[in-house]
Each structure stands twice: as C-alpha cells, then as structure tokens.
Image (cartoon, rainbow, N blue to C red):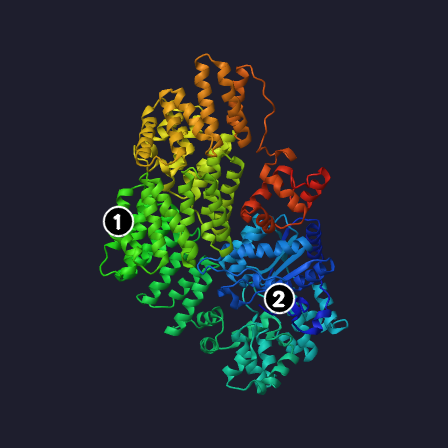
C-alpha cells in the first residue's frame, strides 16, 4: 500500500506538493454524482461508486477530491491504495487500514486454514462501529491490483452493510485482466453501484490545466501540442512540464496519443530523455526502483546497486527535483505509475528479468513478505530454484486462508513455470485443486484433478489427489463418486501409513453418509483401536465421533450420546481438535444426537456455544453447518420463524464463502417451514433448490429432501404421489434412515403414507421404531413417537393419549399439536365432539404460537365446524409493511438498534450469531418497507416500540 497519483497529492499525503494546488478540471458531472452519493449516505443509506478509466485520466485525483469533500461533511474516511505487489498478498489491506486508525484492535484469526469469514466479520464490526458514530467513506484506489482478500471483502460487504452509513468508492483501470476484479465489478453492478467512466477531457479543459501548471495562459505552440495527448490530463501535465523546462521541439517528441493498452511510445521516449539528463546515480536509482515497485525501500535499492544508502542521497534529490520521485513517506515513490512503467519498459527484457530475480533473492534474504518476493519471482519468469519454489509455495499457502480461489490460480501459474513431471508441480496442482474445492469452482477443481491424474503421477501423489477429489465430491453431495476415488487410492501400492489412515477414515465417513453402517464398521479394520493409542488428540476425538455415529445409526442412542459428550469434552481441552471438519466436529455431532433425545434444550445450548466459538475462531467453513443444526433443532421445537432465520443464515454464509454444503438440508427445512406456514409457492421454490442445488442430491440429505417433497405433494392434495415419495428413504425397517431426520417428523411420514393409502411405508416406520426401542428404550420422545405412530397406524385412541402425555415434557410443540389434532379427529369420528374440542383448542393454540398458519387455519375450520368461535389469526410472514408482522425475535432487536448497538453488539447481548442478527434485520427492513437503521430508529421512536420488555 502506498503512494497515489501525482495529481492526487492530498490522498494519503503523497506526491509533488506543487500539484496540490491544481484544480480538478472537466469533471463537474462526476463531482455531482459523488456529492449525491455522499448525501445519500449522510441520510442513512449505503451507497457504492465505481470510478473507471485509463491510466492517467484522473481517477486518483477524483478520489482525492472526494476524500476532501467527505471530510468536510463529517465523514470518517478509510483510504487504501493498492500496488502491483499486493496481488499475491495474504492479508487484507482494508483490514490493516481500519486497524491502523482504530482505537480497538481488529480481531486476529486463530485458524490457519480458512480466515474468510473471520475477515468479513472483523471488517464488518469495525465499519459498523464507525458508522454508528459518523458516516464512513471507504476509498480504494487502483483496485485492479488489490490483494485478493480485500477484493473478497469488496464483493461481499457492500451488500451486507447496505443499511449502514457507508460509502464505498473504487477506482479501477478499464479493461483489467484479473478475473477476481471482474467479479467484484459484476457483483457491485448487481447491487446497483453508480458507475463513473472517466473519458478524455475536452481540449479547452486541457488548456485550463496547462494554465494552472504554468500560472499563465499557455503559448499557442503548447496549445497545439496539447491536442496530441488525446485528452489525458496526466500526459497534459507532463507535456507542460517538459515544455516549460525545455523547448517546444523536445516537448513535442514526448507526445503521443494514449493507446487503449500499455504506455505511449512517445511518453516512454520522453521519460528516457529525462533520465538521460539526470546524473547517473539518479538514473540508476530510478531503474532499480522501477523493478522494485511503485513504492520502494531505499536500502533495498542500495543493496542491489552495491552502494551505501548515504551515497545515493544526491541521486534521490535529483530524481525528486525532476518530478519523477516523491520522498514524502517512509519509502520512495514514483510520482505516477505511468512514470514507473515507462522506466521499467525502457529496460531491455533480459535486464528486467535478471533484476527481478536479483530483487527476489535480495528481499528473501532480508525477510520481506513472501507475496513481495513471489511477485518478483513471477516477473522473472523462471527458471525456479528450490528456494524460489519454497517461497512461492509459502505465499500460496498464506493466501489460501483468505482467498482460496486466488491461491489456486497462483499455484497453477507457478506450476506452469515448472517441468511437467516435477514433483513440486504435482504438489502445487494438488493444493490448487484443494483450494478450488473450497469455492464454487468445484468443476474446475475436478477437471484439474483429472488432468493431473492423466499425467501419471507416482502412487502417493495420485492417492493425495484422489483424496482431495473425494473430499470435494463429498462436499458437493456426490458420495458415490467420492467412494470410487477413495477405493482407487487405497488400491495403490506402498502408501504412507498416515495417508492410508486418512483415506480409510474418509471412506468410513462416506459409508455413514450413504447410510451403510455395516460397511462403515467393516472399514474400521482396527482404525479405532489405533486411534485410541495415538498421541494425537484430534485422532482420538475423531475416532470417538465415528464410533458415536455408528452406534447412533444402529439405534443405540444412549451409547452414541455418551461417546459424543466425551468427544466434545476432550475437544474443549485440545485446541487442535477445533479444526476437525464436519461432520466430525464433536459438538456439532453431539447436537444432532441430542435432537433425538429428551434433552432438546441442551441441543440449542450446544449449538449456540459452538456457533459463537466457531465465529470467534474464524472457522468459517463450519458456520453453515452450525446454522443448519440450529434450524433443524428449532424446527423440531416448533419455532418456525427462528428455524427459517437460521436456515437463511446458513445459506447466506455459504454464499459469502462460496460453498454449497449443507444446501439440500437447509432448503428442505425452509420448504417444511413454508408448508406449515401455508406458502406453497415458496415451499416449491425451496424444494427445487434442494433437489438441484448441488448437481446431485447428497444421499446423506435424501431423507430430508424426501420428507419435504412428500409433505408438499400431500399439501397439494396429491396423496398417492406423496406416499410413493417416501419409498426410497423410509421403506426399510432398520432405524438408520429414520434417524437422519428428527423424531417429531416421523409421525408425519406415517400420516402422509396413510393418506396415500400405502401402508407399507407406515408399517416400515413402525417396525424401525420397534427395533429402535428394543435396543434403547431410554428416551421418552422415542416412546412418545412410537405411541403416536401406533395410534395413527391402528386408529388407537389410547396410544394417541399416551403420545400426548409423552410429548408434553419434550419441548416439541408441533408434535404435541399434531397428536392433539389426531386424537381430536378420532374422538369426533365417534360422535363425541364435546370431548374432542379441548384437544383441538390446544392444537390451535400451539400452532398459532409456532407460526404454523396452514395447520392453524385447518384446526380453526374444524373448531368452527364444531361450533367453537375462534379469534384473529396471527400472521408471521406476510410482506405487508406493518409493525404487527414482526416476530418475537425480531421485536427483541429493535430497542437495541435504537440504543445504537451494532449487529455484533446485538448478537453478543442476545447470545446469538451475528449472522442470525443480520438475517433478522433483513426481515425487519422488508416487513416495514424501509432500508436503513436510521429509518428503523425513527419508526421505533415514533411508535413507541423502544421498550426491551416488549
């Protein structure tokens, strides 16, 4: 990060001081646009502006003007200027800029493998906190060179923080070739960013600029020469300087129209001529500096010149006096990037590459950041020695934690500099595939794996590639293909023991995903015993989780719970265990086991604590799973509004991180919620997404998708089709597939099957429940569900009464409501309506409190048929902008917003995830028809909704 455009001397205090007095010419339309954006943000609404144009056209100068305007308007300004060297940097310049000017430290990541979510949350917290005190302007100059992490932030946060008083302004060169920059532009355009394209200035404005520089009207000869700069203000200023310092003929030689790409030949010649007029020390310093970057350290330049720093001072002074360098900061800086590029391109190619190689060696010896060394290595074009490859590999790994897609691209670029059968090349490409697998570029990752496999790597390398491919396929939901890769890898000879264990563990987990517990147990082959003897706590905990999974799906719930709790306890004592991937995260698995027990309240506590710990540690890859777990637990409790919020938060986080799992599950939860609410159109949309979201339906989520599809089909009145839908997932009498969904959903499977006059599935569920209770009769919820299923299957009122009694202490309101309704219907069928009414009334109350509008309306109709008058229905999800449509959880947030708390502070106060708060806030804005926190505060005060006890 460093200096700015020479015509932007107030921007971060760099540049030739004479230029600070130059007036911005010919940009009245653009200035009006940025004033409009400033006013919008002052009014409480976020805005985004993209300034685009060719080099030298005045982008940085416009940002400097905006900087000054924003400060005059009371804005807190955060400025970042990128450099070419930043393209491979692992950190986020925007985070550093916030930290350097912040009273409190921005959170530092504890997790080495994936810092993306922590990065987003850290910057979000810092900006939200600032925006509470004053409107904020975030200015990013030369964004085409920004570090990948900052580009990731720029793609994501303008949308996330749209309701905050933040103005985002990016200056970017036209026709940039970096794909990541193109994606930022696409995303910002989608968000409605204001686009300002700076074109050439009219001739009259160029003459005004010349007069500003000269302090007088330009002579006719200079006015004629200005026509040759094609409206480029920087070239106009350079021309005036050359004209003022020499004669018109010399100045004319330096004029050429600015082409669409590259540097004008005439300008390069002009810069070369200016170097020829300088002392040799100054010329050599500029040449070495052009290799080191726009900003460079004088000590490094001195080492490359074989000189003492003090001996270069005359050369520094001459270059500064000539207007080519600036010495206003801790490092020397070229007054404009076009000057640096001109000096750099005037060097012969062989000299340039050799100097970049020498710069890499010099910087590596002084402990410079690996990204800077990597840039020079790449610029040198190879060949690469072991030290260079090691440095580049380090840079790739560092970059992968904040920008895995950029790390993958970088790894592939480095691999292209190595010979086809170089072992180091295979390692780099394997890493690249792994990093791409963390993003939505999954197909590219798998294509890369296939290409490397086709080259015939040695067995251990092939096995590692196939392990990466298997993990990618598992994450994408294609478990069968994953298992093929794993078996092919295990068939390879002479594999290292640790690699073989990883392959076997992944294969065993794959069998669990596929519901084949026998195969999972057979894959063990002594792994569990070996794990317990290991000194690696992560291996021990992972073995415990695996054992817990097999016991659980065998129906031995008490033993599964015991192992899950022990694994979670050990994980809390060993930090390394925290980085186990789902579903091996002990607390996440424990929560799933608890959902099938009488300790449903403990489930939510475990999930809340685990979720917040994952956020604090930056374990972003796990957050979609924590939110999905909470969505399932809340659905089981009957809290439909909150279940939907958690499911949406899961999708939002997965979208920000560009990962897909557990997409089918949360979409199925959302479909089930909307079916209960009565919005079948939304339910269909969610179901389509569940079925199509990951290319192939993950078999581990097939029970969820089948459940949602059957319930929707049943709600649409297609009973027979609904019953058939269950056949693939729930036709077996073993409890394995049944346990993939929470217990309160099991009677619904039976009910839908009976509606479709297909008792086989209902009987299979009953058989699975009998098998389950025969192995483990410790959980009241299981006994209650069995009684409920027996009541439905055998039309047994006494069994339904037993189910109701069992449900009352389990915290599952909709399961209790369903049992009450089922019993009420059977009592009514025996012409004993008076006895049935209390059951219907209890069911009506429970469904109303849960937000199950469709169920509630059905029960109310039944009560009216029985002569019972009912009150008004509480609507939860209508889009009408009325305060009464807010849910209880949404209402809790409003007084805290009025108090000025940020979303992070609200999350801490309510002990929930910040992503849950973000989702609630979006719902509040939609329901009230507003866009900003300022509007929400005003409405709350006007209507008196500021009491926390409300």
**Residue 240 horizontal side relative to residue 609, left or right:** right
From this viewpoint, which residue is outermost toward the top?
A: 831
**Residue 719 horizontal side relative to residue 231, left or right:** left
Residue 381 position in % (x across, y down): 42, 71
Residue 908 position in % (x across, y down): 57, 50
- Please say whether residue 177 is visible from this viewpoint: no
- Please say whether residue 326 is visible from this viewpoint: yes
Q: Which residue is mark 1?
A: 523
Element type at marker 1?
A: helix
Between residue 589 and residue 641, name the one nearer to us: 589
Between residue 699 and residue 794, name the one nearer to us: 794
Q: Residues within 10 Å of mark 1 (few under 14, many from 20)?
A: some
Q: CA distance from mark 2 to mark 1?
A: 64 Å
Q: Earlier in the sequence, mark 2 or mark 1?
A: 2
**Image label count:** 2
Q: Is residue 359 above or below residue 403?
A: below
Q: Is residue 803 above or below residue 71?
A: above
- Say which residue appears at 48% left-offset and 43% top-offset: 604
| Mark 2 or 1: the one toward you | 1
Q: Is residue 844 above or below residue 127?
A: above
- Say which residue appears at 42% left-offset and 60% top-offset: 408
* Quarter holding residue 335: bottom right
- Say which residue appears at 51% left-offset and 83% top-offset: 303
Tell me the number on the disc at residue 56.
2
Q: Is residue 16 above or below residue 652?
A: below
Q: Quadrant of the C terminus?
A: top right
Residue 474 position in % (x across, y down): 36, 48
């Amino acid at each position: 990060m460093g200096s700015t455009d020479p015509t932007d001397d107030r921007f971060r205090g760099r540049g030739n001081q004479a230029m600070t007095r130059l007036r911005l010419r010919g940009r009245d339309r653009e200035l009006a646009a940025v004033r409009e954006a400033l006013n919008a943000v002052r009014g409480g609404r976020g805005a985004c502006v993209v300034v685009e144009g060719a080099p030298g056209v005045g982008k940085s100068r416009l940002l400097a003007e905006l900087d000054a305007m924003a400060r005059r308007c009371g804005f807190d300004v955060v400025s970042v200027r990128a450099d070419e060297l930043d393209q491979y940097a692992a950190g986020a310049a925007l985070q550093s800029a916030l930290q350097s000017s912040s009273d409190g430290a921005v959170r530092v990541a504890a997790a080495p493998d994936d810092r993306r979510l922590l990065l987003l949350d850290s910057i979000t917290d810092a900006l939200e906190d600032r925006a509470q005190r004053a409107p904020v302007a975030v200015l990013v100059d030369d964004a085409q060179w920004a570090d990948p992490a900052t580009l990731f932030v720029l793609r994501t946060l303008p949308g996330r923080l749209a309701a905050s008083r933040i103005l985002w302004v990016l200056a970017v060169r036209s026709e940039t070739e970096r794909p990541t920059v193109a994606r930022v532009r696409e995303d910002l355009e989608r968000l409605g960013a204001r686009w300002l394209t700076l074109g050439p200035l009219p001739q009259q404005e160029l003459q005004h600029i010349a007069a500003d520089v000269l302090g007088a009207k330009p002579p006719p000869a200079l006015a004629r020469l200005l026509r040759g700069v094609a409206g480029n203000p920087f070239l106009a200023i350079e021309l005036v300087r050359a004209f003022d310092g020499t004669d018109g003929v010399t100045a004319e030689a330096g004029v050429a129209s600015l082409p669409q790409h590259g540097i004008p030949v005439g300008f390069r010649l002009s810069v070369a001529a200016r170097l020829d007029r300088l002392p040799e020390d100054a010329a050599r310093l500029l040449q070495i500096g052009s290799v080191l970057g726009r900003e460079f350290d004088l000590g490094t330049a001195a080492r490359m010149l074989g000189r003492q720093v003090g001996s270069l001072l005359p050369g520094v002074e001459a270059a500064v006096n000539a207007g080519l360098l600036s010495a206003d900061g801790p490092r020397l800086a070229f007054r404009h990037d076009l000057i640096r590029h001109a000096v750099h391109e005037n060097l012969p190619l062989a000299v340039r590459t050799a100097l970049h190689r020498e710069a890499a060696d010099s910087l590596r010896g002084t402990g410079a950041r690996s990204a800077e060394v990597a840039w020079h290595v790449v610029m040198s074009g190879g060949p690469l020695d072991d030290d260079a490859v090691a440095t580049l590999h380090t840079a790739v790994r560092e970059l992968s934690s904040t920008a895995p897609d950029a790390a993958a691209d970088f790894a592939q670029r480095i691999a292209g500099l190595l010979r086809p059968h170089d072992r180091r090349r295979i390692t780099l490409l394997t890493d690249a595939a792994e990093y791409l697998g963390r993003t939505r570029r999954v197909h590219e990752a798998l294509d890369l794996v296939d290409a490397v496999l086709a080259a015939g790597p040695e067995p251990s390398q092939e096995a590692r590639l196939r392990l990466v491919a298997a993990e990618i396929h598992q994450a994408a939901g294609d478990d069968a293909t994953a298992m093929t890769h794993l078996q092919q890898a295990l068939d390879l000879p002479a594999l290292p023991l640790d690699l073989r264990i990883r392959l076997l563990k992944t294969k065993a987990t794959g069998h669990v995903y596929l519901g084949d517990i026998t195969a999972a147990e057979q894959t063990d082959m002594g792994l569990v015993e070996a794990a317990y003897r290991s000194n690696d706590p992560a291996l021990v905990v992972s073995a415990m989780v695996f054992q817990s999974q097999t016991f659980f799906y065998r129906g031995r719930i008490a033993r599964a719970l015991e192992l899950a709790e022990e694994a979670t306890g050990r994980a809390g004592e060993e930090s390394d265990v925290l980085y186990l991937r789902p579903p091996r995260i002990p607390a996440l698995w424990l929560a799933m086991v608890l959902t099938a027990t009488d300790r449903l309240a403990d489930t939510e506590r475990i999930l809340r604590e685990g979720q917040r710990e994952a956020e604090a540690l930056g374990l972003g890859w796990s957050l979609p799973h924590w939110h999905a777990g909470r969505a399932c637990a809340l659905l089981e409790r009957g809290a439909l509004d909150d279940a939907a919020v958690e499911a949406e938060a899961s999708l939002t986080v997965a979208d920000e991180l560009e990962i897909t799992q557990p997409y089918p599950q949360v979409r199925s939860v959302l479909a089930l919620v909307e079916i209960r609410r009565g919005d079948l159109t939304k339910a269909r949309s969610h179901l389509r997404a569940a079925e199509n979201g990951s290319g192939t339906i993950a078999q581990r989520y097939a029970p969820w998708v089948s459940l949602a599809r059957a319930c929707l089909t049943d709600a649409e009145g297609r009973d027979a089709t609904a019953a058939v839908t269950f056949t693939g997932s729930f036709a077996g009498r073993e409890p394995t597939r049944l346990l993939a969904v929470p217990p309160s959903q099991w009677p619904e499977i039976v009910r839908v099957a009976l509606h479709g006059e297909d008792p086989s599935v209902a009987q299979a569920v009953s058989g699975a429940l009998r098998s389950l209770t025969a192995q483990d009769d410790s959980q009241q919820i299981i006994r209650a569900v069995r009684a409920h299923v027996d009541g439905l299957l055998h039309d047994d009122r006494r069994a339904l009464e037993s189910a109701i009694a069992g449900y009352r202490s389990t915290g599952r309101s909709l399961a209790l409501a369903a049992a009450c309704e089922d019993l009420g219907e059977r009592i009514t069928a025996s012409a004993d309506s008076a006895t049935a009414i209390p059951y219907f009334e209890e069911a009506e109350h429970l469904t109303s409190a849960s937000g199950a509008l469709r169920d509630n309306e059905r029960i109310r109709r039944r009560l009216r048929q029985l002569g019972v008058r009912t009150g008004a229905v509480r609507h939860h999800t209508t889009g009408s902008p009325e305060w009464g449509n807010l849910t209880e959880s949404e209402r809790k947030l409003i007084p805290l917003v009025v108090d000025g708390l940020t979303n992070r502070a609200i999350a801490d106060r309510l002990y929930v995830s910040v992503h849950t708060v973000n989702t609630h806030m979006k719902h509040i804005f939609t329901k009230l028809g507003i866009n900003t926190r300022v509007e929400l505060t005003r409405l709350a005060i006007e209507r008196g909704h500021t009491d926390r006890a409300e």
